[in-house]
Amino acid sequence: MRVATILIVDPDPATRSLLELLCLRLGHDPIGPREWVDGEEPDLVLLEPASRPGVRLARGVRRRFPQLPILCVSIDGPSPDSRELAPVDHVMKPFRRSRLERALEQALIPATDGAAVRRTA
């Protein structure tokens, strides 16, 4: 698997650090919103949809990069706001590391067509 740039949008510093560490262990390059600053297209967005500023940022990213996969990681279930973003999956916190790893791997598999849905069990 190639190295992916993963934009992590989570307001909790401890959770953000955990997600960054997991991405690094999988060989990917995690970045935060301040590091991204409207730069190049990331390969994936990891989003806590309970964060209003995070959802606003994700909407802007989605407008700019319509095919970019968004993976929601939240203590809350899917909401109208998160569904509007058409995430590839929604991982509930607390999660098993293996569950999040599978979701990340699946989200980074290129879709064979624009309508393909990449979901994990």
Image (tube, grey):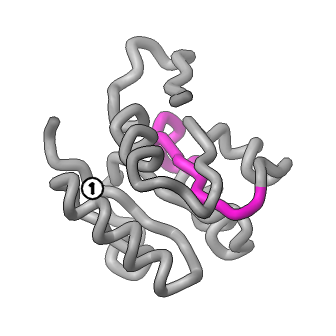
Q: Position of residue 15 (x, y in %)?
A: 49, 76
Amino acid type at circle 1 is: Thr
| Rendered view: 113 above or below 65 | above
User: Where is residue 62 shown, x and y percent of the image?
Assistant: 57, 48
Magenta stretch, residue numbers = 62-76
**Quadrant holding the N terminus:** top left
Q: Is residue 65 magenta?
A: yes
Q: Position of residue 47 (x, y in %)?
A: 56, 60
Residue sitting nearer the eye, 87 or 114: 87
Q: Nearer the viewer, residue 93 or 63?
A: 93
The residue indicated by pointer 1 is 5
Residue 117 visible to an observer of this rendering: yes
Query: Does residue 63 appear anywhere in the picture?
Result: no
Looking at this rendering, what residue extends furthest in the top direction? 112
Q: How many marks?
A: 1
Q: Pick whichever, 105 or 116, lies toward us.
A: 105
Say what secondary structure mark 1 lies in.
strand
Task: State which quadrant residue 17 falls in.
Answer: bottom left
Residue drawn at (31%, 62%) of the image: 22
Rendered residue at 21%/53% (across/down):
26
Is 63 magenta? The answer is yes
Q: Is residue 95 left or right of residue 106?
A: right
Image height of 51 relative to 92, above or below? below
Most extreme residue toward the bottom, as rendered?
13
Q: Position of residue 109 (x, y in %)?
A: 33, 28
Left or right: where does residue 52 sit relative to residue 46? right
Viewed as shown, does residue 7 lie left or right of 74? left
**Residue drawn 39% across the image and 73% down it:** 18
The quarter of the displayed image where residue 37 is located: bottom left
Are there few (<14), some (14-19), or many (20+) residues within 10 Å of tag 1?
Answer: some
Quadrant of image for the C terminus:
top right
